[in-house]
Image (tube, grey):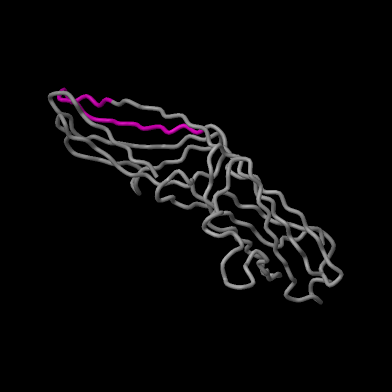
């Protein structure tokens, strides 16, 4: 989320002011303003401003460009416009590596190694493994004495370059159907990692990493 604000400092004022915000990535240009694609105000006098709050889930890595455009009509009736550009870099916050181990009973054990690749400590809220419809999952990171994860509140902060390991047991719901499947690659599920920056007093959690998990069947 981000707040965009444009203030008119000069006399006289202007009218029909339109604020528009777009995000330019390497592959597309995404409009970020409201449902009409822009914020509008009929008149703007000195000292007043036009603003909006934009929300967007960034899914692409690399260089991003936030483009803020303001158009208006001056006292002479001429339509004018100016733009401001804000460039920023989106890096991969986490690196996830997986290993599969299959038993003779066709149970699958998945080891997920998660590394913090940012220069900041991350608050690890939860790591989920959502199985595909053919499988059910058992989270082996749960304490045997209660329903909490093995990571307590005092040690759920991942420092830069730290690597944490998680273990899951994945079982086919129908073993006979699983044996009857043709050889090839099948999806066993998707992992999601929810984190927040520890520097924030009230961190907002987000899905920092999604990984589609596949195994040779």
Q: Is residue 98 left or right of residue 179?
A: left
The image quarter containing residue 165 is bottom right
- Quarter of the rendering containing residue 150: bottom right
Q: Is residue 200 left or right of residue 82?
A: right
**Image x and y of residue 61, in percent:** 57, 38
Locate residue 4, reporting x and y percent. Answer: 32, 37
Q: Nearer the viewer, residue 64 or 208?
A: 208
Check residue 124 for magenta coloring.
no
Place of residue 177 in the rendered image (x, y in percent of width and height, measured from the top left): 79, 74
Q: Position of residue 57 (x, y in %)?
A: 48, 47
Magenta: main secondary structure equals strand
**Extreme-front residue of the structure:** 154
In the shown orientation, is residue 161 left or right of residue 87? right
Residue 31 higher or lower than 214, as above or below: above
Q: In the rendered structure, does residue 72 fall within the stretch colored magenta?
A: yes
Q: Residue furthest left?
A: 12
11 vs 162, nearest the viewer: 162
The residue under the point 27% across, 25% down is 80
- Front residue of this view, candidates 136 and 144: 144
Q: Residue at x 42, y 45 (%)?
A: 200
Magenta residues, start to end: 64-80
**Residue drawn at (61%, 52%) of the image:** 210
Q: Is residue 183 left or right of residue 134?
A: right
């Amino acid at each position: 989320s981000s707040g965009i604000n444009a203030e008119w400092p000069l006399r006289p004022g202007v009218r029909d002011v339109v604020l528009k915000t777009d995000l330019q990535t390497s592959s597309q240009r995404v409009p970020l303003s409201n449902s009409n694609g822009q914020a509008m105000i009929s008149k703007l006098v000195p000292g007043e401003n036009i603003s909006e709050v934009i929300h967007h889930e960034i899914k692409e890595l690399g260089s991003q460009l936030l483009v803020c455009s303001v158009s208006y009509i001056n006292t002479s009736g001429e339509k004018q416009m100016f733009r401001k550009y804000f460039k920023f870099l989106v890096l991969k916050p986490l690196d996830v590596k997986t290993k599969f181990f299959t038993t003779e009973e066709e149970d699958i054990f998945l080891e997920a190694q998660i590394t913090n690749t940012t220069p900041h400590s991350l608050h690890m809220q939860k790591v989920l493994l959502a199985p595909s419809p053919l499988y059910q999952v058992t989270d082996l990171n749960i304490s045997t004495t209660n329903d909490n994860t093995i990571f307590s509140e005092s040690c759920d902060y991942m420092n830069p370059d730290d690597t944490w390991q998680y273990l899951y047991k994945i079982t086919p719901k129908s073993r006979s159907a699983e044996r009857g499947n043709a050889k090839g690659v099948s999806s066993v599920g998707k992992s999601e990692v929810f984190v927040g920056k520890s520097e924030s007093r009230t961190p907002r959690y987000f899905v920092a990493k999604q990984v589609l998990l596949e195994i040779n069947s």
